Image (cartoon, coloured by chain):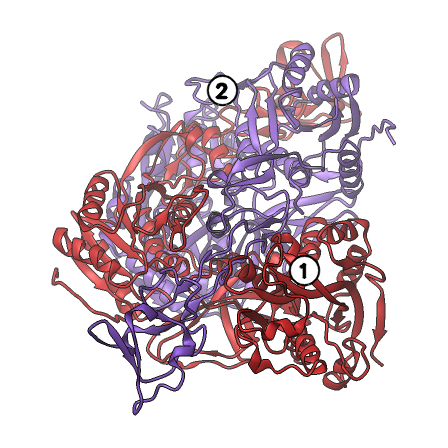
Chain colours: A red, B purple
Amino acid sequence: MHRKIYIENMPLEEARQLWMNHLDSMGFCTPPVEDIKTESALNRISSKAIHAQRSSPHYQAAAMDGIAVRAAITFGATERSPVIISPDQYLEVDTGDYVPNDYDAVIMIEDVNFENDYATIINPAVPWQHIRSIGEDMVAQDLIIPSYIRIGPFEQACLITAGVDEIEVVKQPVIAIIPTGTELVDYGTDSMAPGEIVESNSHMLSALCQQWGAIPFRHSIVRDDRDQIKKAILEMIDQADMIIVCSGSSAGREDYTSAIIDELGQLLVHGLAIRPGKPAILGSIQGKPVIGVPGYPISAQLVFHLFARPALYARQGLSEPDEPSLECQVARKLPSPMGVDEYVYVNCAQIDDRYYAYPLNRGAGVTSSLVKADGFIRIPRGVEGVEAGEQTQVFIHRSRPTIDNTLVCIGSHDLAIDVLADLLQHHHGIRLISSNVGSMGGIMSLRRQETHMAGIHLLDPQTGDYNISYLRRYLPDIKWQLLTLVKRRQGLIVKPGNPLHIEELTDLTRSEVRFINRQKGSGTRVLFDYLLNKQHLNNEDIYGYNHEEYTHLAVAAAVKNDACDVGMGVFASARVLGLDFIPIIEENYELCILPDIIKPAYLQLLIDIIKSQEFAERVASLGGYNLDGSGEIRLISV
Amino acid sequence: MHRKIYIENMPLEEARQLWMNHLDSMGFCTPPVEDIKTESALNRISSKAIHAQRSSPHYQAAAMDGIAVRAAITFGATERSPVIISPDQYLEVDTGDYVPNDYDAVIMIEDVNFENDYATIINPAVPWQHIRSIGEDMVAQDLIIPSYIRIGPFEQACLITAGVDEIEVVKQPVIAIIPTGTELVDYGTDSMAPGEIVESNSHMLSALCQQWGAIPFRHSIVRDDRDQIKKAILEMIDQADMIIVCSGSSAGREDYTSAIIDELGQLLVHGLAIRPGKPAILGSIQGKPVIGVPGYPISAQLVFHLFARPALYARQGLSEPDEPSLECQVARKLPSPMGVDEYVYVNCAQIDDRYYAYPLNRGAGVTSSLVKADGFIRIPRGVEGVEAGEQTQVFIHRSRPTIDNTLVCIGSHDLAIDVLADLLQHHHGIRLISSNVGSMGGIMSLRRQETHMAGIHLLDPQTGDYNISYLRRYLPDIKWQLLTLVKRRQGLIVKPGNPLHIEELTDLTRSEVRFINRQKGSGTRVLFDYLLNKQHLNNEDIYGYNHEEYTHLAVAAAVKNDACDVGMGVFASARVLGLDFIPIIEENYELCILPDIIKPAYLQLLIDIIKSQEFAERVASLGGYNLDGSGEIRLISV
């Protein structure tokens, strides 16, 4: 039962079963309870069935304005022989008023003629007419809510109405979260040395705890020191129901955690056959579950989701809610090793009548993928991956309306696309997701009809025009429209003051100059290669020609941080990071839109925004843009 | 623009448009903003696009443990001519460590042979291998989240990582809620006189405000006094962004509110063509929107949903989220007047491959319908209702997994069904919804195959057996199973001490005895009529024979509250309300189950629970039950 298990690569399902059985055997899944006032019960979980303490209404009530009578005295009333009721035989009542037991019917005020307090009626009353009987809503002892139900606004109101002033609820589990790592610094630290990392995982896990009904308690950052980590765990063990050690990702780091668990309690699992999240640790100390989560944010989140979430739901007497799923076509091939359960985060959108899943950057350190993601695909062990176009189940955490109101723009990157996304979201609740795969990548996505539009700026060296010759060549059979988004200045981005005196492309071949390039297939790369060729320059003479970045801002950041001296990009990205800029060319950045698969209403909203004053002002303020013709359709395919 | 509009029956759409235009013209839909610390930003709404303040990583980082080198010095390395790197030419690095700019590649530790600090390699390094470039996750100035996005755990972590320590968010709107009504008493009041009502609406609306991102402020109860209501409104007007007056439902009551709005500001609408919710009031005072919501809880909630919700979303710069909907077959005809938009609350469940909507009690005072409801059907103006079996759109607020994991039991009421529901919910997360329409109603639902099972106890006077002859007659072509739930004692429920000395059925014909009956079609009514008949008693001699209640508890409550002296029902309902009981007969209460439309796994769980010790103990503790044979299948149709 309590044998020590140490494995390096335990299959996920085995680990989950082992973990839940272990929790169960410790009594962790029997929720502790407490009595609280009903007015504080919002969002809490009932721990037993709750019955009404009082009927509602708790008295016989008039359902109309009128007079209360004993029905028997009205029997036989007709227009020809009305019944006259003397003042001592009736009671005037308003809606909601108490109808004493001496009366068993209410006659509507409209049906009564009064004369000197004598009431005349011409129709008999049916017994119990227009009376709300006691308990019409709820009868005392009626079951109001079963056990283990979350108390929402309606449940709370109903409990108050039913005279339930105090209820027994599940205690909220308290989760201690201990961030460890000598390289970590606290959020809010102004200047960070290279190698220092701002600690964010504990904040993310705390927020997730709250979503799952638990109360997080964050310990301060603990250095990589076995004694200090041990001290922190022991400090927390009495106050918390579960302990999370954020282990850091450096090699050997997590061994502290597993060794401490092994020393103080029971080490259950160290190492899972999942990706990301392999170095996860599971165990318990003094009857409290302990999870060691890896340092990379995506891994941390995934391990927490897979092991802390079911534990917290069980601790509250709840079944872990199923994640809603959506059948999607995967836009890109996803290879995956046979031996692991792999989780790939994706965006989802509806293109025409199909749903597509767009895989996000799979790096475990890429926090921004979590923000962008609508859900994930699970590639199970024993499966080698997913082919492009394959139908796959996506487990979504974003709301369906958000997914359904999404426009997809795959292709080149430009800051104006961010402005467009922001305005579409704000004014119309439409989400624009963009994927930076370069202009040629965008055209290929259009060709496969897996995007509503693409941002492209491909110079045709033959004609000097942009985009059209490429579209004619690669999209011969598809209807498309070419819409001007912006014209923008491309050039060389250099350090402030241009210390290396870079003035033209030939300077890039100087031995002391470190260049950074854009990826193959990007419009900027096409332009750069075209310019090199025109000037008969050899790319082998440029140091860093093969060092690639994927966006204008990434190029500028590399210059700014002295990872290199120069790169090619748009003026706005140089300016936003305070760099110098040597202009080379003004180019057309256009949106190629597929009118058959974009909703016409959305297309119109898109055009309206691009033509708007607000768009023009925000883009102009970035610098280096020319908005002549923005929002105009330059060409429609035949 | 500001003309006063007073109508009694304004169509909903017109009122909604008028309201939103009015809010817009007052500037209500321009969200005020504030700067807050990112650590407090969870669940808040960004008020502008947020860009990264720092790249992540903000330095060139090793992606592996190994040595950092300048790639150029490794070129040409092979097994036959290894390259030997001197200590001043490399730097040992762990994953995550800073790689200074003097180096442009990391060689994995496994690929290096050390000898006296000299490193030997046999493969050349590719420039930038195993290096995480600056901004791999996010580049400074990258757009992290657009404006008007709710900040969740991942967004918060990402902001922290990106060095965004403070952000501009939408201020949470403050909503003042003023309950008015002389009949209202505060929750927690121990004894209430007939005619007094516990005030619950303000708590419900407060909780809804919180769900929609606003901060509620509840005023204490104000008596029905024009000056006091006016004073309360003026007290709140400076502190709140919007004012809700819970108007009470008595005739004429809401005129105070509308008159005050008219006096102090602008009265926009009084009276809507909706049901429930007709007496709604809309207006504004000193530029603050004011809503008068009706007193009945369902009406209050509906008016709040229709008018406060869109206003609060607009105030936060958000589009009002669409409610998810589900196509359901309506189980019962729903007549509706042509002139109104009517909202009918329903339960939903999946029966076989169809979804059914089961209308709940339509009384505007029935709070428990709100607790039970999974959503609502909207019957638009100009439509006369919905036919039984018609496909209708249900707007659901309950999660789909909850709806999908639902068992339906329509038929007779028994307290053991409540115990069953509680245990199914707790142990298996399966919801059991039951509808009390009597045994015959249950059989009709089985016949239409719109329920998984029915609770029935129909005595066959010919055979003395229960249920079987009815099932054979009404379900000749359907497969069914008859499962024993409980045996239970039926009898007469009388006041404590039996003051009227009721001993047998003939006593019910005495003139001073007030009886209460069960509805036609209920098993208890069938039993009662059978017993009357057997004893040659005439129902016209029984005062209250036509006064019907729908459950055992409702009958007991009527006796308890002196609405009558005696009724027929089960022992447990007498006992739970502290009443006396004169036993008459023990009867079989059985579940008739349709095995073709219930999931086999669910049927097994159901049987397991009915056979469990826990079920037996909880039912036995109610009193009057016999659990011999509980969970046994007594008969299966051929």
Q: Nearer the viewer, residue B200 or B552?
A: B200
Where is mark 1, residue-wise? A581
Q: Is residue A103 left or right of residue B80?
A: right
Where is mark 2, residue-wise? B186
Determine which of the numbered discs, if any, sits on residue A347 in the image: none
Q: Quadrant of the N terminus of chain A?
A: bottom left
Q: Residue B423: x, y in percent?
A: 33, 50
Residue A168, quarter of picture: top left
Chain of the residue under the numbered disc 2 shown in the image: B
Mark 2, Cα crowd under 10 Å, few <14 / some 14-19 / many 20+, is few
Q: Which amino acid type is marked by label 1?
A: Phe
Q: Nearer the viewer, mark 2 or mark 1?
A: 1
Are both tags, 2 and 1, on one chain?
A: no
Q: Residue A153: x, y in percent?
A: 51, 37
Chain of the residue under the numbered disc 1 shown in the image: A
Answer above or below: position of B220 versus A23. Answer: above
Q: Is residue B220 left or right of residue A164?
A: right
CA distance separating discs 2 and 1: 70 Å
Q: Residue B19: x, y in percent?
A: 76, 36
